[in-house]
């Protein structure tokens, strides 16, 4: 039994906003933290925490979407949206793992330089940082593109044949 209704409204239409905001925000934070040590220094453990909240929001939203799917007319648009929605989980898992790894490597480098006179301020070696930035970019862009595709298909499923391109005469 999941979170199906909130004040009589299908929970999915409310929870989806968390995914739409948190996933791109996590992707952007990950890319910036992986590429710029100064940003990582400011984020600290907030980066993997943000990724964890994003990760938790996806199965909650997916579960509530599966409940909603059983309560609406089935058509090709709904099925496509459901199929695309199932594809987001691997992306947010990758975001979480990458965010945790970037934070961990930065933290490890910062602790290593504490006992020395180096002035690197916890900067991870350049090849590792470049690899992390490229990987973070791939994962981040992939996750954001998947969120866009899911949202677009969901909007089409929800709004097809539900409006008119011209204003109703009573509302002009």
Image (spheres, rainbow, N blue to C red):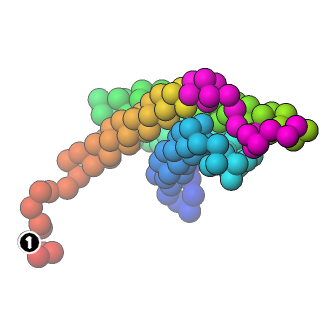
| Along the line of sight, the residue nearer the viewer: 172 or 9 | 172
Q: Is residue 111 magenta?
A: no
Residue 117, quarter of picture: top right
Which residue is denoted by mark 1 in the rendering?
Answer: 169
Q: Give x and y (percent) for residue 146.
A: 42, 33
The location of residue 27, given as percent across then percent down, is: 53, 40
Give the image quarter of residue 99. Answer: top right
Q: Which residues are magenta?
A: 116-131
Q: Residue furthest front?
A: 117
Residue shown at 47% from the left, 28% from the top:
138
Tell me, yes or no, whether the highlighted magenta stretch contains residue 125.
yes
Q: Where residue 167 appears, x then y in whole percent?
A: 11, 66
Residue at 52% across, 59% down? 8
- What residue is shown at x 59% (from left), y 33% (from top)? 95
| Placement of 109 over or under 165, stated as above or below | above
Q: What is the crowding at mark 1: few (fewer than 14 residues within 10 Å), some, or many (at least 20)?
A: few
Tell me the quadrant of the picture where the N terminus can be found: top right
Q: Is residue 2 left or right of residue 9?
A: right
């Amino acid at each position: 039994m999941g979170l199906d209704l909130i004040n009589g409204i299908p929970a999915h239409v409310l929870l989806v906003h968390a995914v739409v905001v948190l996933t791109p925000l996590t992707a952007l934070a990950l890319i910036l933290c992986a590429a710029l040590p100064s940003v990582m220094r400011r984020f600290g453990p907030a980066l993997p925490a943000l990724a964890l909240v994003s990760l938790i929001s996806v199965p909650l939203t997916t579960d509530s979407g599966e409940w909603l799917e059983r309560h609406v007319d089935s058509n090709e648009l709904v099925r496509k949206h459901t199929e695309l929605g199932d594809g987001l989980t691997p992306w947010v898992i990758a975001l979480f793992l990458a965010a945790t790894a970037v934070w961990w490597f930065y933290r490890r480098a910062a602790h290593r330089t504490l006992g020395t006179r180096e002035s690197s301020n916890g900067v991870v070696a350049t090849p590792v940082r470049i690899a992390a930035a490229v990987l973070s970019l791939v994962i981040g862009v992939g996750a954001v593109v998947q969120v866009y595709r899911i949202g677009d298909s969901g909007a089409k499923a929800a709004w097809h044949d539900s409006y008119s391109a011209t204003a109703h005469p009573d509302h002009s």
